[in-house]
Every structure is written in C-alpha cells, then in structure tokens.
Amino acid sequence: MVLPVQNGAAVLDSAKEAPAAAAAPGQPGAPAIPGQRRDGQRLGMPPAQGQAQAPAPAPTAPLPPPPTSDAAAQAAAPGTQPAAPVRIESFSRVQGERLRERPRFEDPRGWDDVRRADDGRVIIQFDNRTFVRHDDSERFISDGYRPEYDRLPGGRTREIYERDGGVQIVTIRNRYGDVIQRSRVGRDGREIILFYAPELADERADRDYRWRDPGAELPPMRLTIPVNQYIIDTTSDPDRDYYRFLEQPPVERVERVYSVDEVRYSARIRDKVRRIDLDTITFATGSADIPMNQASSLRKVADAITKVLDRDPSETFLIEGHTDAVGSDESNLVLSDRRAESVARVLTDAFGIPPENMVTQGYGERYLKVATQGPEQQNRRVTIRRITALVKPVAQNR
C-alpha cells in the first residue's frame, strides 16, 4: 500500500512533515510538497541528475485491522502483558496555597529558542521544528469571572475558572505549564475528567523532563482504511453523518495515553485519529475572522459534537488552524492559532459547545492540503479531530 496523496500533497500530516521518513518499509516514499519550507529549509525538490536512489526495503507483514472502539485502541498489543489500570487522582480537592497572580512556568530542556509574539503567544523551537504556544484558559473566562491559582505540592499549580451556576473548570499543570489534568466540577461536586496524562502525573517525571516527539519512537504511519473514511471535507461531502464519523475510534492502536501538548506537537500521534476539514470557512488572506454568513456552516459539525458530548460529556476535540504558504513561518503560526481559536469561540458562543471540551492549536503552513506556495483557499482551513482516546484512559471510571 502506497501512502495516499491528493492535490500533490500527502494526506497524512506526518508524511508532510518528513516525507522520506514517513514511508512505511517496502513502500515508495510519499512525495514531498515541492518547495515546502520547514524551519527555513525547502523540502521535496527533485534529486540532482544522476543521483542514486536508495534501494527498496523488504516487504513487511500485514498490519492488524483498525481498533473497533476507543478501549480496544488502548488495549495492550497482542502477546504483551496488559498494563495495570490507571488510577486517576483528583487534584481538584488537594490542599494548595493561594497565589495572587498567574504563576510563571519554567522552560523545559529541549526548547532551543523561546520568543514572544506581539499578542502574547510564545514561539518555541524543539526537535528542529517551530511551534506556537498559547494560554487556552482565556476561552473559559466569562461574565467577569477571573481565575484563581493555587500552588500544589511537587511544583504543580491549579487554575480554577468558575462560571455562572457554580461550575468550575480545574486545570492542573506541572512546573513547565504542561497540562496534567483538566476537570469540570459541577455545582453538585461531581467531577468529570476531561483529559489526564499519567506520565506527567508522576512527580518523578520532572527530574529528567525534556521535550521530545513521542511519534519519533513509532514506525511510519500506514493508513489501512479508505481516505474518505479517514477525512471528511465539508464542502465536497456535506451529506455525511458527522456524528457517526466523529464517534469512530482511532485508526491504529494507541500505545499509551499522551498529554494534550504531546498530541498538539506530534503529527504522528494526531494521525491516529480521523479528521474533519472545515473548508466551508473561507478565511481571507491574513485574517482569522469568520464572516457572519459562514458561521452557520458550522451547525452540522456542531450538532455532531453536541451529540457526542450528550453521550459522554468527557470527550475532547482538537481544533487545528492552518494557513497557506504566503507570509513568514512565524506570522503564519500565529495566524493559524488565532483561526483555531476563532472557530472554537463560535462553536461555544453560537452553538453552546463547552470551551473546556476543546483544545486549539495552530500549525501555520506546515501541513498544506494543496501543494502550492501561492495563495490557496483550501490551505486556509480549520480541522477538527476527536482526540479522547489519545489523552485519557477511556476504560477507567470517572
């Protein structure tokens, strides 16, 4: 099976990021996007005339079928010892020391460069890649409520955002600002865990903490289902059942529960789950504003998300922002991050999707859908994935 390509660009984001490395053994390498930049370099240019081509590796064994449920995706690989059940701790009730202002977080080892954009977003570099980082908690603030912060044992902090009706959104972060856990605590005291990173919850993890891409430890992604079962384009496939699509499990096994930031920054991990490309939202060049006459085009996907949350209010969705290749890498990262936030805010303000059930991330021009360096509307898009099985032990009781 050859890695799928459409519009001259690889379908899998992990193949766009490192085309040569993303081809599975025994398959031709996925073609790169001609001229695409990655951290100031141009990728995908044809080899020099007469340059020798690497020999094709030997074929590999067939892949197992896709998981049939989220729990099956997280189950141990055949022939291996099942892992012990994860015990999810409730950090919302741990005694802490109240802080007067938002805490400052440390920069972990592995961040090669850190600089702040004009709007407060942070541009970071690690693993020879550049990412934008933002404070997603700002989307939880409403009706004048301001967050409260507590210092917890082990270098952790707790953020508490309260909404009308006494509902609290509680986020636990480690000393580097990475989210360990996010919960919604109702007025009745019932706590719903939205996502939980067991590895970050282990205090020993701070001793040798370093940013790394967990996808680098995995073999290249191989898609074993048709592309139209992996991606929905809202313009070309408007009659699909978005709910049935979103409730589908990951397309391959989930080796462990990942942190939200690991999912945000690893294309290989995100590729495990299906995606909806919201190409009905036509952003103008350089803009993150959603035209009023286009906000209604989100209704069908919003209804599907609502239906998923009615079944399980602890589900989490990733809203991704993308740009075309016009402009600088850094400006496109910030712009795409703003686009993802714009869609998340419309889903909350117009359709009532709780903000805590969504996380956002911008990727700039890294994952072009159409292989071109010029203006292209299809590249100025937002993508939605249901990432619950990636960021929480789904088999454990809440």
Image (spheres, rainbow, N blue to C red):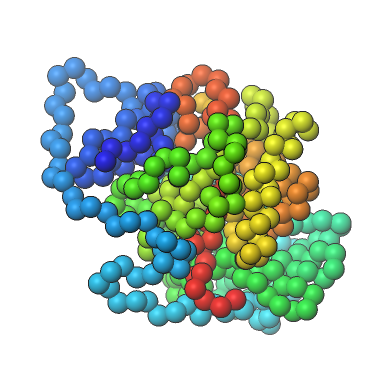
Q: Is residue 45 left or right of residue 129?
A: left
- Going 62% across and 66% down the picture, which residue do you hit? 312
Q: Which of the pair 108/367 is nearer the observer?
A: 367
Q: Is residue 23 left or right of residue 265?
A: left
Which quadrant of the view contains residue 100?
Answer: bottom right
Residue 239, position as x, y percentages in the image: 59, 38
- The image shows a total of numbered marks equal to 0
Residue 162, position as x, y percentages in the image: 79, 66
Residue 117, position as x, y percentages in the image: 63, 40
Which quadrant of the view contains residue 296?
Answer: top right
- Going 71% across and 47% down the picture, which residue do you hit? 347
Residue 42 visible from this viewpoint: no
Residue 392 visible from this viewpoint: yes
Q: Relative to residue 13, is residue 247 depicted above or below?
A: below
- Going 66% across and 29% down the picture, which residue do you hit? 283
Q: Relative to residue 50, is residue 313 depicted above or below?
A: below
Image quadrant for the C terminus?
bottom right
Residue 317, position as x, y percentages in the image: 59, 54
- Going 51% across and 69% down the picture, which residue do you hit? 394
Q: Is residue 17 left or right of residue 265?
A: left
In the rendered image, the residue lying farthest to the top is: 49
